[in-house]
Each structure stands twice: as structure tokens, then as C-alpha cells.
Amino acid sequence: MLLKASRMAGRRALKAVLIDLSGTLHIEDTAVPGAQDALNRLRQASVAVKFVTNTTKESKRILFERLKRLNFNLQENEIFTSLSAARSLLEQKQHRPLLLVEDSALEDFTGIETSEPNAVVIGLAPDHFNYSTLNKAFRMILDGAPLIAIHKARYYKRKDGLALGPGPFVTGLEYATDCKATVVGKPEKTFFTQALSDLGCSPSEAVMIGDDARDDVGGAQNAGMLGILVRTGKYREGDENKISPAPHLTCDSFPDAVEHILQNLL
Amino acid sequence: MRTSHFVMADTGWPGCAKSLKGVILDLCGVLYDSGEGDGVAIPGSIEAVKKLKESDLQLRFCTNETQATREKFVAKLRRLGFDISVSEVFPPAPAAIAVLKERGLRPHLLVHDGLLPEFDGVDKTNPNCVIVGDAAENFSYQNLNEAFRVLIGLEKPVLFSLGQGRYYKETDGLKLDVGVYMKALEYACDLKAEVIGKPSPTFFQSVLNDMGLQPHEVLMIGDDLLNDVGGAQHCGMKGVQVRTGKYRSSEGLCLCVSSGLLRFIPVFFSLRTHGCERLRGRPPCPPRRSSSGVESGELGGDGPRGSGRQICS
């Protein structure tokens, strides 16, 4: 208890909670038991809530609709994705991207010019991760096109088991071309600070809840937030030992994380 | 006719020529160039192999070829006119099979269809390791995912990569090589692959074991400075880089740079017989980045040479 107190000493009151989606609130089309009620309890406290996700297969609208179907209480503008972060970067640099993203995510890039591409954007796109498309991307990068990674997740959980994320393919292309990708999603610091920016609070006033030790908790803590690791989704035994510092808390699932926040962090 | 073909970058020559008891030759870029059909034999190479075989030297061939079985590509070389047999050739797959046997491992294979027959006699049930080769079109998301799932499900995951090339050149452009997918799986599973094939020291050692010779008694001749020559010298062998491939970098890493077997072999034999052949050489070239953009001394990236399967103009 003393240890916890001293770690909490430098922190200001909690103002915002960032919540991961896939693996934390739901797994594909099934909500984590008790998560909807836990979210409602959290909303009754005076904290802002934002849903942050590296999910790149789906547009904001699709994510929002799924969460509504699962009876979660939220607004579409509370969702911040790595696709949003990628789009901002493309607009900023005026790149014309080769978009290796699932069709369902393309709508988040409407309005961006894609003819005669001069940049490669890699999201989670199993359909595009075939030999011939990757060769195409590879040759573009060798010719000077910047490589933008929506995120570098190693793997994620599907109904049928674990599946490769974009990270391995981005790493492979980095090796092939001797270039470094610009990563816009978790665990990049800017992702977290961007997510908090319109909530008017600093990282030291925020906590992140997620199932990915490195990308959710490690990334958030690196940005100055507290991190809570939940043992659902892609969590595997011992993940809490893979980051330093260790998660502020490791607990069974989202409802437990909310209880902890309500009792200890407000 | 060119007046000088050799760069003597180190001492040891010509004296060491006499103490050599074996020679290892790379295949693509040294004996032949790949291209349409079987490719084409490099001028002088057929005779060079013949001469080496007629001598008292032991001769072996080393390659990172993993798109076809030994039998298939030796047959191709024989069609081109080379006197070469399967037992003399060392590609990565048989070396990998030996390792599997030694360590009691059963592989999940992510390789080119053409390589599968090489693994016919191997127990692939209930795999406890993954072998990745230059699988080309077989590098689909699904296949990669399957390999990943095998690894992530193992308590002690083991990944073997048959070579570690970044890319190679074919008639229809540059293609990603096995090293890229090795890195992908390393990242996904947070592990390090074991490379079987050039430039792994264990690989070269297996050839030496077969020859029954010590490293200092063997000369490696290749066109890839890092994977062939660098790898061999790292094990204590002597290295000669030939310039018959596209790869033209010369950094003084190797003892001698020759324009080809055509030129080198006669001189080599002369050195062995007479011991003091006077050569018109020029000073070693200063270290520089090759046109392929590969850093010298880096035993990893090998630029456009890739696994050696490059079209030479």
C-alpha cells in the first residue's frame, strides 16, 4: 500500500480514461461480460472517456455500430483510431498513398488522392499481404516512397486463434529496404497525446486500460499515463513481466479495472 | 587483354596456395548465370571445374538455393556441361535435415513447392519447429500465419531460416527473399531465427567436415563478398571473390579478387606448382560502399545479390 501511495504521489487527479476496444471491451462480436455496466459506472464518475484502438480493418463508423449493437453507451466522436492518425499524417505531408488496408477501412481515407502513389501505408490487411502485393510495396519503398505503418502489432486474437498483425510485415519490409517505417498507432507516444489533446488533460491525469502489455500499457506509461493490463483478448500468461515499468495494475478484465479506478484513482 | 586481374589484399598468397587441400565453389554467379531456362555457363567455368577435379584437391559446391531439390538443380548444371554430382553439392536443405535429426526436431515447412521432395523422409507430424525457405508465391498470409501459430504455440519455439537474403533479382524485377519473412516471424514471436546456409559458420563447417579438412586448408570462391567470401573467412578459410557476378565491391576483406574462374584457376594452379608466380597486381581498393548499397563487414544484407539468383548481363 505504501508503494502504491508513493507512486501516486506525483500524480494529479484522474481526468480521463482511455479504453482499448478489441480484446478489452469485446472480442469480435461478443462483449466482455459485465463490460457495458462497468462503462456506465465509469461514466457516472467525472472522468472523460475515449476509445482508442489500433484496429485498422474497420472504419470508425463500423466500430461504433458494433459497440452499439453490443449495448455499449458511447458517441462516435469518442472513438480515436490509428487510421485517424494516419490520415492526418498523409494530409500533412500531402502523400498519395498505396493503401494496404482492408476495404472496410478505406472509407476513413475518402478524399485522399491515391493515383500514382508515392507512399506506402500498411494496416491490417491479410488480403494484401500476399507475395505479389508486398513485392510491389517493396519496390516503391526502394524507389523512395515513405513507409507508413498504421501500427506494428505483432498479432491479435481472432475467433479462430491468434493471427499475424501488420507489425511482422512492416518489419520485413524495413529489413528488405533498410528503411524505418513511420508508425502512427499505439504504442507511439504521439498517438496517446493526440487522443488526449481534445480532452484538455495531460498524460499524468489519464489512465489507459488494455489487453496488450506492450502496445496499450507500455505505450501509455511511456507517454506518462498509468496503465492497467487486463487478462482478456490477446493477453498471455506472463505478459505483465514483459514491460518495464510493470503495469500499474494487472487484473482479470475491464470491470475489475473500472472498480480499481473508482476506488483508488479518483 | 586486361593487364591486371588480381588484387592482393593480404599476405598469405602465394605461399598458402601450396598448403590448400580443398576448394569450395559457389554456384550462381561463379559457375553459371541464371536466366531463361537453365541459364548460361560462365565462360571458363566448366573447364575450371574439370581442372580442379583432375587435381589432388577436394572439391565441393555451396549454394543458398532453396527453390528446388539438389537433384533438380544438379541436373540443370549437368545439362549446362558441368561435371558435378549431388554428393558434392551443399545447399541449405540437407544441412537443415541433419540439424533436425541431431536435435530430434520435427519441422513445419514454409518453403517453395519445388523443395518439398527434399523433406520426404522427414517426420513432419506434430511439428516442434518451423523451417522457412525462399518460398516465393507460397509466402501467403495464410501460410505465414500457420507457421506463426506453430511457433507461438511452442514452449521452446525454434525457427530455422534457410539463408537470410533480403531480395534477389529475377527477369520480372526484384523479389523479396527469405530473410524478409524470417524477420517477420522473428518480430511476431519475439525470437531469433537460426540461419542455415551461407554465411552461417555451422553451414561452412558441415562442408569442411564432409571434406575432412581444417578451415585453413580450404579456399572458398564466390561472387558474394559478404555471404560467400566474408562468411568463409569468418570461419578461417581463405576467400576469393570473383567478379563474374554483378557484385563488384572489393574492400580488402578477401585475399584476392579475380575477374573469374577463367583467369583465376590457371594462376592458382601455377601458384601451387611453382609457389612463386609473379603477378602484376595493383594495390587493394579502398573500402567503399558497393553499388548495391551493402555495408561492408555486415553479414546480413546482401543487396541485389540476394540468394545469388541474379541475371548477369
Image: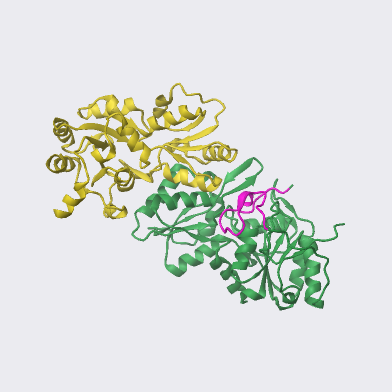
- Residue in front for this viewpoint, A229 or B88: A229
Which residue is pictured at 48% across the width and 52% down the height? B182
Please, is residue B272 above or below residue B3 in the view? below
Give the colour chain B carries in the figure: green
Which percent across, then down, holds residue B153? 34, 54
Side of B105 relative to A197 (left or right): right
Which percent across, then down, holds residue A119? 52, 33
Chain identifier, yellow in the render: A
Q: Residue at the far front: name it.
A: A10
**Residue B286: within the magenta?**
no
Which percent across, then down, holds residue B151? 39, 54
Answer with the quarter of the image where residue B73 lies. Answer: bottom right
Q: Residue at the far top: name it.
A: A111
Answer with the quarter of the image where residue B272 lies. Answer: bottom right
Image: magenta residue range? B287-312
Side of B230 relative to B192 (left or right): right
Does residue A54 appear in this view?
no
Side of B115 relative to B311 (left or right): left
Please, is residue A30 above or below residue B30 in the view? above
Which residue is pictured at 16% across the width and 50% down the height? A5
- Residue in front for this viewpoint, B201 or B60: B201
Does residue B250 appear in this view?
yes
- Residue in front for this viewpoint, B272 or B139: B272
Answer with the quarter of the image where residue A159 lies. Answer: top left
Please, is residue A195 above or below residue A252 in the view? above
